């Protein structure tokens, strides 16, 4: 018989499961609060980067106009100066497209990862490559 001071196994299991559930809920609340702070900081940071990118675009436009006017100062007609700057951007865009296409052609499927993932179900069942292939190994008892 159990004494009144000693809890039963059922009560211990119940207390443990309640404590685990409370712990999991607390961890989830903590994660939510941390993610909320991180998401806010990330949103503000992304917004600042977007504004900086917009300013960068404006700078590129202004520098392009300045380059064209420097060419005009060298004695060329303004139409030709702006056409030269536009042509330089056209060449740069074409070069970037060619390099980008070459890099895209290098994309391959993650073959090693796919092969490893295909082995997971058999590994969970405790099979090896040899057992799946029907090979009987002599160094292990059957």
Image: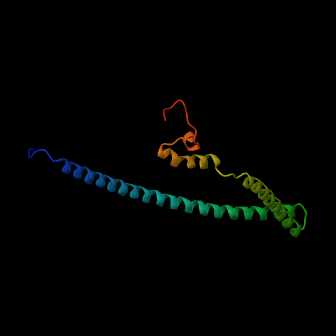
**Residue 83 relative to residue 47: left or right:** right
To which quarter of the image does residue 75 belong?
bottom right
At 48% from the left and 32% from the top, the residue drawn is: 141
How many labels sit on residues?
0
In the rendered image, the quadrant that contains the N terminus is top left
Observer-nearest of 77 and 111: 111
Q: Residue at x 57, y 39 (%)?
A: 130
Q: Position of residue 135 (x, y in %)?
A: 58, 38
User: Which percent across, then down, holds residue 99?
Assistant: 77, 54
User: Can you tell which quarter of the image residue 22 is in?
Assistant: bottom left
Question: Residue placed farthest to the top in the image?
Answer: 139
Residue 33 or residue 44, whichever sits in front? 33
Q: How is the model colour-coded?
A: rainbow
Can you give x and y, in whole percent of width and height, for residue 35 in the image?
Answer: 44, 57
Question: x, y percentage for residue 48?
Answer: 56, 61
Name the outermost residue toward the bottom.
79
Q: Quadrant of residue 60?
A: bottom right
Q: Nearer the viewer, residue 26 or 66?
A: 26
Q: In the image, is 52 to the left or to the right of 6?
A: right
Residue 103 sits above or below residue 141 on the image: below
Task: Please report the residue visible at 75 percent of the width from the left and 61 percent of the height from the top.
Answer: 63
Whether residue 28 sits left or right of residue 79 in the image: it is left
């Amino acid at each position: 018989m159990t004494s009144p001071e000693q809890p039963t196994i059922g009560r211990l299991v119940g207390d443990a499961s309640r404590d685990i559930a409370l712990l999991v809920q607390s961890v989830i609340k903590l994660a939510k609060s941390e993610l909320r702070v991180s998401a806010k900081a990330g949103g503000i940071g992304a917004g600042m980067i977007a504004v900086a990118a917009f300013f960068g675009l404006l700078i590129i436009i202004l520098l392009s106009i300045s380059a064209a006017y420097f060419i005009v100062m060298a004695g060329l007609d303004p139409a030709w100066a702006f056409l030269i700057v536009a042509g330089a951007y056209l060449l740069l865009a074409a070069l970037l497209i060619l390099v980008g296409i070459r890099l895209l052609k290098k994309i391959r499927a993650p073959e090693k990862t796919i092969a490893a993932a295909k082995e997971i179900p058999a590994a969970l069942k405790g099979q090896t490559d040899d057992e799946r292939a029907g090979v009987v190994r002599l160094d292990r008892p059957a």
